Amino acid sequence: MRYMMTYDLMETIRITNQWAGATAQAMASYPIWGTVPHPSFRMMAAWGEVTERTFSRMIVKPDWGIDAVVGSDGRDHIVSVETEIARPFGDLIRFRVQGRPEKPRRIMLVAPMSGHYATLLRSTVQSLLPDAEVWITDWHNARDIPVSEGKFDIEDYTLYLADFMEHLGPDLNVIAVCQPAPLALAATAYLGAEKPKAQPRTLTLIGGPIDPDAAPTDVTDFGRRVTMGQLEQFILQRVGFKYAGVGRKVYPGMQQLASFMSMNAETHTTAFVEQIIRVAKNQAGDHDKHNRFYDEYLAVMDMTAEFYLSTVERVFKNREIARNDFTVAGKKVDIAAITDVAVKIVEGERDDISAPGQCLAALDLLTGLPKSKKAAHLEPGAGHYGIFAGKSWRNNIRPLVLNFIDDNAPKAAPAKDRKSA
């Protein structure tokens, strides 16, 4: 019960701050204060507006906001978001572009389950839609999943990915971003042993911790310093009475957010102070750069306790995938079972979350894959976010990934061969 009380206390603090911001904005916005020539009321209203928006965003799942893409015919084509496979802990959704012929490139993006919603990859989806059919894994907030649905750990996650890959077929190209990279590799290897014909055609791993010890970061240092008992005692909580997942043990999203922001506290503080000043000067907009970033960054989701703990213990501490000693449903997953899937590694030179070398370690594990089907790219000057959603992705990495997909697609037969056939 004490964990539920802590969870509800955090929610109470969030609501109180949201209320305080809304109250300050309302009180300082009365017309009468226009007769007082002092900027304090304008600053108070601005502080209230920014504070209310900040704390209200923490429990809102962002919209995809992808309404249309421009087709090769120069027309805007409406995009609909459709659930193709619905599961208790995550769905496979498709971005269907209306009114255009289906693209030969078929891509499944594997979104992280690391505190943020899949919408964190919104710009990645937008950049791929003009040239491909796109699906993405849409993980659910653990606080909204009833305890009766059971557990969800990294083995369950891996089986979800394997099922999604099998559903979409062997002409699929998988792109895994950050945290799911080792599990996407494991899911492909699992299919290699169990259902070889269901493996995807290509697998692109972007900035993921295949071998966390290959290059130390603050994330890997934390995983080594903290014991599993400490994590379970001080980080995990039970969902409070407000949500459908009441009683489920989770790593709360708001607690994760506090950790994220503490790593760059000065940067975030400066950003919010500058935003308050812009609002006071009527220079801010509802969808300005600050709000676009923080509306997404502040929207956090709870992870199931078993997924968080198994990730720390099995991926980071025991390095089961790095040592090729990972098991799923009692079956050993041998990375060498991947013999016909082209694999590309993408890393950022300045990635401080999954440092260069951590993801590259996957190529050494692929002992059954010929060199011709292995590729790697290190993006100069790019940080973690930039390699999948920033300028580096748009200008350099995206074209490389699409070329990699095309290079490993079946070659069209010459015209006379098709005719004689």
Image (tube, rainbow, N blue to C red):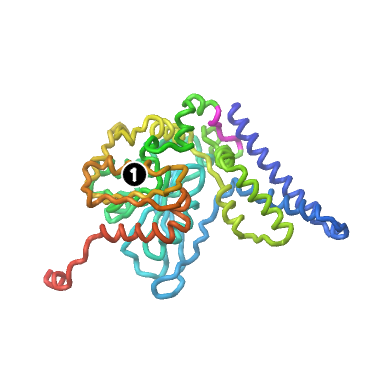
Q: Which residues are magenta?
A: 234-241
Q: Nearer the viewer, residue 179 or 26?
A: 179
Q: Quick check: 401 above or below 336?
A: below
Q: What residue is drawn where x is 34% and y is 60%?
A: 402
Residue 213 quadrant: top left
Q: What residue is drawn where x is 41% and y is 57%?
A: 94
Q: Is residue 308 visible?
A: yes
Q: Quick check: 11 above or below 54?
A: above
- Mark 1 packing: few (<14 Cα in 10 Å), some, or many (20+)? many
- In the image, 391: left or right of 414? right
Q: What residue is drawn where x is 18% and y is 67%?
A: 413
Position in image of residue 132 (x %, y %): 37, 62
Q: Residue furthest top?
A: 229
Q: Is residue 150 visible?
A: no
Position in image of residue 331 (x %, y %): 28, 33
Q: Nearer the viewer, residue 277 or 171?
A: 277
Magenta stretch contains residue 236: yes
Q: Residue furthest front?
A: 380
Magenta stretch contains residue 9: no
Position in image of residue 102 (x %, y %): 34, 66
- In the image, 1: left or right of 97? right
The dominant secondary structure in magenta is loop
Residue at which label 1 appears: 360
Q: Amino acid at mark 1?
A: Leu
